[in-house]
Image (cartoon, rainbow, N blue to C red):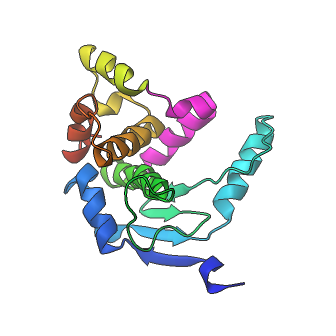
Amino acid sequence: MSSENSPMVRSLYAWEVQEARRVFAASLQYERVRVHENTGWPDSVNQLGMRLKGIKSTVPVHNAITLGNHCYFPVQLLVDPVPVGHPDHGSFCWLIHELTHAWQYQHMGWRYLGLALYAQFRYGAQAYVYGEEEGLRQRQREGWKLSNFNLEQQGDIARNYYERLCTGQDVSAWLPFITDLQQGLS
């Protein structure tokens, strides 16, 4: 097995912390987070879950899992930042989603894990759907806070905010919810 495919555990790189601060500000204890790369079991858990749900996939789908402050990825993430628009930029956006789960753990304790699993079992792939820009604007009008969204939706709100911020798109619909995140309001 080559070293680039060997399992590896590391702290966040300085550039990852700098970029993640654009989403989480000071509300995430970055030094506590560990990234586990080239760890195959998250994919195995995903495949088992799909089989149990009767879902057949012809395309292998990678899956990451965050347990507490530990983010497990089946692949190696970026060592250095890449420009926005680069095909690998999406892997950092994936890390933003998983860091949201570490944030949830840091602010809610282990209760976050039960809530995240509940959302996945109850809603399946729909657990991540929050309505994008129009959905967020509607939820704002209804007085929603970040805590009204399930934990997978929160992860994708953070991911999509970061993606849009990097590409210079309007993020105004995301800002009230990202402000909740930055203020540690779980």
**Is 129 in front, or is 108?**
129
Within the magenta stretch, is there residue 111?
yes
Image quadrant in which you'd find residue 126:
top right
In the displayed structure, does residue 36 sit left or right of residue 40?
Answer: left
Please, is residue 71 above or below residue 160 in the view?
Answer: below
Q: Main secondary structure of the magenta part?
A: helix
Provide residue 106's location: percent of width, then percent of height. 33, 55
Provide residue 38's location: percent of width, then percent of height. 61, 71
In the displayed structure, does residue 138 sit left or right of residue 124?
Answer: left
Answer yes or no: is residue 29 visible.
Answer: no
Q: Residue at x 34, y 52 (%)?
A: 103
Q: Which residues are magenta?
A: 110-130
**Is 44 in front, or is 87?**
87
Image quadrant in which you'd find residue 2:
bottom right
Q: Residue at x 72, y 44 (%)?
A: 49
Q: Residue at x 26, y 20 (%)?
A: 140
Provide residue 50's location: percent of width, then percent of height. 74, 41
Q: Residue at x 37, y 45 (%)?
A: 163
Which image quarter is the C terminus in?
A: top left
Within the magenta stretch, is there residue 5?
no
Answer yes or no: is residue 101 visible.
Answer: yes
Provide residue 100's location: percent of width, then percent of height. 38, 50
- How many numbered marks appear? 0
